[in-house]
Every structure is written in C-alpha cells, then in structure tokens.
Image (cartoon, grey):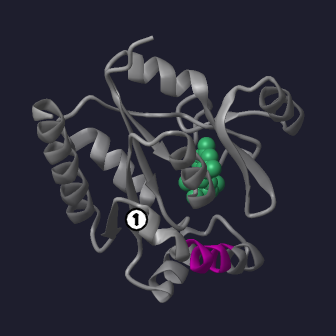
Amino acid sequence: MAESGRLIILSGPSGAGKSTVVRRLLERCDLPLELSVSATTRPARPGEVDGRDYHFVSKERFRQMRESGEFLECKEVFGRDWYGTLHKQVDAGLAAGKWIILEIDVQGALSVMEVRQDTLSFFIRPESQEELANRLRSRGTDDEAAILRRLEVAAEELQALQRYNFEIVNRTVEQSVDEICQKLMQYSHGAKHA
Ligand code: 5GP
C-alpha cells in the first residue's frame, strides 16, 4: 500500500511534560497530525479513556497480541507494565496521509528507528533532573519508589539523545509546541520540494 504520511517520534523521560506538549501540538499545529494510540497493560488513571489515551488490555491479551505480531514495537517500561505501538494504527494513518505521532519511551523509539529510516524524531527533556523530580512528585500519580525508578531511567535515557533528529528542552509547553511545529513545517516544505 502506498504511504503518503509521515512518522514522527516524540520521546524522552516520563514526566518531562510530553503528553501535554503532544496534546497542544495536535490542537495548534496546522498539519494533518494524528496520535497513535498504544496498547498498555497498566491500569487507566483517573480521567483516562480507553481507546483515546491507550487501549487498556490485560497482560494475557497483550501477550497474545504480541505473539500474533500486532506491534511495530513493544516494551516493558519501568520493569512493570507493557506498552506497544500497534501496526494497524500506524499503517492506517500513514496510508490516509496523516502525520502519525508516536509518543513512546526511548527504547521503543530506538527500535522504531531501526526498522524505519523515514522517521522524524524529537527528544523532549526537562531543563534538569531536579525539574523532572518536581514534576513527577507534583503529578502525584506514583509512589516514591516508582518516582526514583523513573528518575533512574530518565538519566539512562539521556544517553540516547544523539540518536534523535532534534532536542527540545521543555521550558514552557507553548514554546516547545512552537519549536516542534516549526521543524515539522520546514520538513513539510522540504519534503514537497524534494
Ligand atoms: P505512562 O504510564 O506515564 O502513560 O507512560 C509511561 C511511558 O511509556 C512514557 O514514557 C510513554 O511515552 C511510554 N509509552 C507509551 N506508549 C508506548 C508504546 O507504545 N511503546 C513504548 N515503547 N513506550 C510507550
């Protein structure tokens, strides 16, 4: 099937403010952007909606999906829950000419970059580890052990920074959205003239 869309990866440490940036990007950036909804085994948080934020599935269901090859990539994040990007989400969107956004962890992003050379990738990071710790604590969704684990993983993830096309330091949401949208627009114009 001919693909006319683009595949965009947005990743970086959890708690760096990625989801908020992605939400605003979808609202504000004038491109046919669409967020790929991943499957996960983690329970829904208050306010999250099945099919919109994630496809929430049991561990057993996830294992079946994995075995039947439904994932472009899948990873066990924080050694606890599984997350995976669904082929069908990505392929259908690309075929329809959408610019599909994968908001995924660094390991998942590196896997996708291995199999697809046509991605445009952004590493979104907080200004510092201290800032990240503050965000995770004020979010109030994790206990202290989980927060420490997330900080440890974030420090490891920074090592992968140079594998990405762009680094975005998330000082304010609007500024990050502007930066990402501008890069995507440049890419869109460049692609048309290529
Ligand atoms: P959260 O539990 O806070 O929603 O997400 C935890 C982490 O999992 C985040 O860093 C998020 O980007 C990542 N994540 C979400 N969906 C996927 C996915 O499909 N694949 C991978 N590899 N990571 C994902």
Assess whether residue 193 is covered by the magenta stretch.
Answer: no
Q: Position of residue 151 (x, y in %)?
A: 62, 79
Q: Position of residue 176 (x, y in %)?
A: 26, 62
Which class describes the residues within 10 Å of circle 1: few (<14), some (14-19), or many (20+)? many
Residue at 30% in and 48% down: 24
Q: Residue furthest bottom?
A: 130
Q: Residue furthest front?
A: 194
Image label count: 1
The answer to whether residue 97 of the structure is visible from this angle is: yes
In which quadrant of the rendered view does residue 149 lie?
Answer: bottom right
**The one of 63 and 150 positioned closer to us in this rendering:** 63
Residue at 49% in and 34% down: 36
**The one of 193 and 13 positioned closer to us in this rendering:** 193
Q: Residue furthest right?
A: 60
Q: Position of residue 174 (x, y in %)?
A: 22, 60
Q: What is the secondary structure assignment of the residue under circle 1? A: strand
- Quadrant for the N terminus, please: top left
The answer to whether residue 16 of the structure is visible from this angle is: no
Is 178 on the left-hand or right-hand side of 148?
Answer: left
**Residue 100 in the image: above or below residue 131:** above
Kind of residue at disc 1:
Ile
> What residue range appears in magenta?
150-157
Q: Position of residue 30 (x, y in %)?
A: 17, 36
Is 80 on the left-hand or right-hand side of 35?
Answer: right
- Per the image, the residue denoted by label 1 is 124
- Quadrant for the C terminus, please: top left
Is 137 on the left-hand or right-hand side of 80?
Answer: left
